[in-house]
C-alpha cells in the first residue's frame, strides 16, 4: 500500500500535536509538515504538494474556508476537515467548497475520544487511496442558495402516463453530501414520491445536514423520526448512528429507527434501508447508490432487483470514491450507470417526466 503524505493545518499547538500523533499511528501515513495558520498552510501546500490535508476551519487571518477555496483552485488535494465546529453548518459549507470529509475534534483531551478519532481518521485516510480527484474538483462549482433557486412548476406526469415509483431510496458515503444536494436541487418543486436518504454520517450531524437542505430546497427535508409516515413531496434523512427502515402498517408506510448490530461497519446502513424498501414497495422502488467507500448497498440493491425495482449507480468518472458504486455494479443487478451530472435527469426520466 502506497504511503499517504499528509499536511496538518491548525492554529492550536495541542491540536497539531494530537492530530500528528494520531496520523503517525497509521502505518500508511507520513506527516510531511504542519502549518499554524492559513497563509503558512497555503505556502506549504503549494511547496509540498501533499496527498492529503487536514484542516481546521477557525484560524486567525486566512480562515479555513478561504484557504480551502484557494487550494481547490491552485493546488487541488483531498482535504479532511478536523474541527471542533463540525457540529454545525460550517462543515457542510466546507464540503461544498471541496473538502472530502470531516472528523470532529474532541472537546476535551480524553483518551477514549482520541482513540475514537484515530479509528475514524484511519478509515477515512484509507478511503482516499482510491480518491477520484477530478470528480472532487467537478463538485466544487458553486451550489445555488435558496434565494437563487429557479422557480419550479408543480410536477405533473404527462397525460396517459402512470406514476411508476412511489419511493426513491439513495445511499451515499464519502463525497455524498454535495452529490445529494446537486441531485435534489434539480428535482421538480413538488415531488410525487418520497425520497429516503442513508448517508454515512455520525450522530448529531444528520439533523444539521437535513435542516441545511430544507432551507435550500422547495420541498420538505427532515431528519427521520421513528413513526414518520411516508408521503409524497418529502425527503427523509436517516439519523446518524441509526438504521432507517420502512414497514407497512395497515394502509400506511412508516419509518422505524433501529440500533445497528455490532458487526455493522457502515451506519446508517444503506443495505438495511434498501432491503426494507424492497419488502414494502417491490417494483414501485427506485434506488440509487452514490459515491462512497466500502460495499454498503451491494446487498440492498440485490433485494431491490429481486422485488422488481430499479437500480442506478454513480459512474466512476464522477464518483469521488468509487467503492460503493463499484460494489453495487459488481452484483450485476444495476440497470444503469449514470454520471452525477445526469443522475437527476435519469431519475425524472424513469419517473415519467422526460
Image: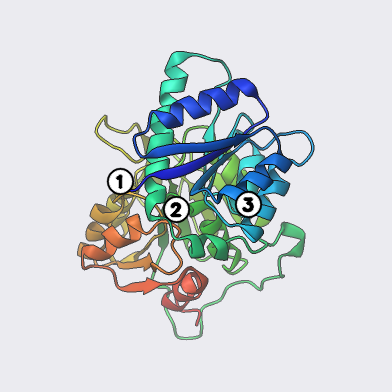
How many C-alpha atoms fall within 10 Å of the one at disc 3: few (<14), some, or many (≥20)? some
- Determine which residue is flagged by label 2: 196
Horizontally, residue 18 falls left or right of residue 262, namely right
Viewer-nearest of discs 2 and 3: 3
- Determine which residue is flagged by label 3: 46
How many C-alpha atoms fall within 10 Å of the one at disc 1: few (<14), some, or many (≥20)? many
The alpha-carbon separation of the residues under discs 1 and 2 comes to 12 Å
Residue 20 in view of the camera: yes
Q: Residue furthest right?
A: 61
Q: In terms of secondary structure, where does tag 3 sit?
A: helix
The alpha-carbon separation of the residues under discs 2 and 3 comes to 41 Å
Q: Residue furthest front?
A: 47
Q: In terms of secondary structure, where does tag 1 sit?
A: helix
The alpha-carbon separation of the residues under discs 1 and 3 comes to 43 Å
**Residue 327 at x, y percent in the picture:** 27, 58
Q: Earlier in the sequence, mark 1 or mark 3?
A: 3
Q: Residue 31 or 227: which is nearer the viewer?
A: 31
Q: Earlier in the sequence, mark 2 or mark 3?
A: 3
Q: In terms of secondary structure, where does tag 2 sit?
A: strand
- Determine which residue is flagged by label 1: 272
Question: Can you tell which quarter of the image residue 27 is in?
Answer: top left
Amino acid at each position: 500500500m502506497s504511503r499517504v503524505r499528509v499536511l496538518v493545518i491548525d492554529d492550536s499547538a495541542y491540536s497539531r500535536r494530537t492530530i500528528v500523533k494520531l496520523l503517525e499511528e497509521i502505518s500508511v501515513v507520513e506527516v510531511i509538515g504542519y502549518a499554524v495558520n492559513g497563509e503558512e498552510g497555503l505556502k506549504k501546500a503549494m511547496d509540498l504538494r501533499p496527498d492529503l490535508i487536514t484542516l481546521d476551519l477557525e484560524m486567525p487571518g486566512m480562515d479555513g474556508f478561504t484557504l480551502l477555496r484557494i487550494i481547490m483552485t491552485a493546488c487541488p488535494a483531498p482535504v479532511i476537515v478536523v474541527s471542533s465546529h463540525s457540529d454545525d453548518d460550517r462543515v457542510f459549507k466546507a464540503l461544498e467548497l471541496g473538502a472530502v470529509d470531516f472528523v470532529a475534534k474532541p472537546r476535551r483531551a480524553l483518551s477514549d475520544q482520541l482513540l475514537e478519532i484515530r479509528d475514524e481518521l484511519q478509515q477515512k485516510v484509507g478511503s482516499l487511496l482510491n480518491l477520484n480527484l477530478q470528480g472532487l474538483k467537478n463538485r466544487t462549482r458553486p451550489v445555488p442558495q435558496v434565494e437563487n433557486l429557479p422557480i419550479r412548476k408543480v410536477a405533473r406526469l404527462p397525460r396517459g402516463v402512470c406514476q411508476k415509483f412511489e419511493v426513491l431510496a439513495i445511499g451515499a458515503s464519502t463525497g455524498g453530501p454535495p452529490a445529494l444536494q446537486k441531485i435534489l436541487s434539480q428535482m421538480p418543486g413538488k415531488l410525487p414520491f418520497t425520497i429516503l436518504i442513508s448517508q454515512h454520517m455520525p450522530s448529531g450531524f444528520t439533523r444539521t445536514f437535513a435542516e441545511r437542505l430544507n432551507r435550500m430546497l422547495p420541498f420538505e427535508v427532515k431528519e427521520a423520526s421513528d413513526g414518520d409516515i411516508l408521503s409524497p413531496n418529502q425527503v427523509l434523512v436517516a439519523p446518524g448512528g441509526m438504521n432507517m427502515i420502512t414497514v407497512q402498517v395497515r394502509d400506511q408506510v412508516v419509518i422505524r429507527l433501529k440500533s445497528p448490530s455490532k458487526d455493522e461497519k457502515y451506519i446508517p446502513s444503506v443495505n438495511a434501508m434498501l432491503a426494507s424498501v424492497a419488502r414494502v414497495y417491490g417494483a414501485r422502488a427506485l434506488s440509487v447508490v452514490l459515491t462512497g467507500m466500502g460495499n454498503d448497498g451491494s446487498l440492498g440493491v440485490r433485494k431491490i432487483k429481486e422485488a422488481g425495482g430499479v437500480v442506478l449507480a454513480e459512474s466512476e468518472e464522477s464518483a469521488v470514491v468509487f467503492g460503493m458504486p463499484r460494489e453495487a455494479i459488481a452484483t450485476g443487478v444495476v440497470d444503469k450507470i449514470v454520471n452525477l451530472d445526469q443522475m437527476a435527469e435519469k431519475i425524472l426520466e424513469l419517473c415519467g417526466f422526460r
